[in-house]
Amino acid sequence: MAKSNKPIVWGLFAAGGTVSAFVLPALIFVTGLAVPLGIFGDDALSHERIYPFVSHWFVSLVLFGVIVLSIWHAAHRIRITLHDFGMRGDGMIGTVAYFAAGMFTLGTFFALSGM
């Protein structure tokens, strides 16, 4: 029986879809609506208030998970969309999509570890 990496890719895709569906709307509401409307105060996202919170190791880990899982979900979604549009070079498209997701994962790691 041939070994496949499909369970890994599908697992990241499913986890990313779940995170994107449940966590991103809350983050968008807080950072895109609630703070600009002044619900949390005028300086809710000021550097002095947000940096100590975001630089905590657990918050950085959660942010890493949200960003990376969303990236892997998007990479798989792009691959499938291109296939649906008739681009049948699935091996090349998958390689490029997942390589880009891997590079964005490394970039996210280095960006969050530099806090």
Image (spheres, rainbow, N blue to C red):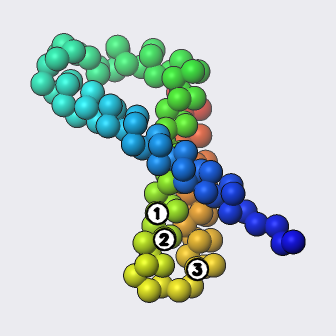
Count residues near mark 2 (Cα–Cα under 10 Å), then give few for <14, some for 14-19, many for 20+.
some
Q: Identify the residue shown where x is 42% and y is 19%.
A: 51
Q: Is any part of residue 44 visible from this angle?
A: yes
Could you tell me which secondary element the residue under label 2 belongs to? helix
From the image, tell me which residue sits under label 2: 80
Above or below: residue 99 compared with residue 70: below
Residue carrying label 3: 90
Residue at the extreme front: 1
Residue 55's place in the image compared with 108, above or below, is above
- Which quadrant does the N terminus fall into? bottom right
User: Pointers 1 and 2 in contact (CB under 8 A)?
Assistant: yes
- Using the image as rendered, state which of residue 100 and residue 6 is in the foreground: 6
- Give the residue at x 62% y 51%: 11
- Amino acid identity at mark 3: Asp
Say the numbered circle drawn on residue 77.
1
x%, y% of residue 25? Answer: 32, 37
Residue 114 % position (x, y): 56, 32
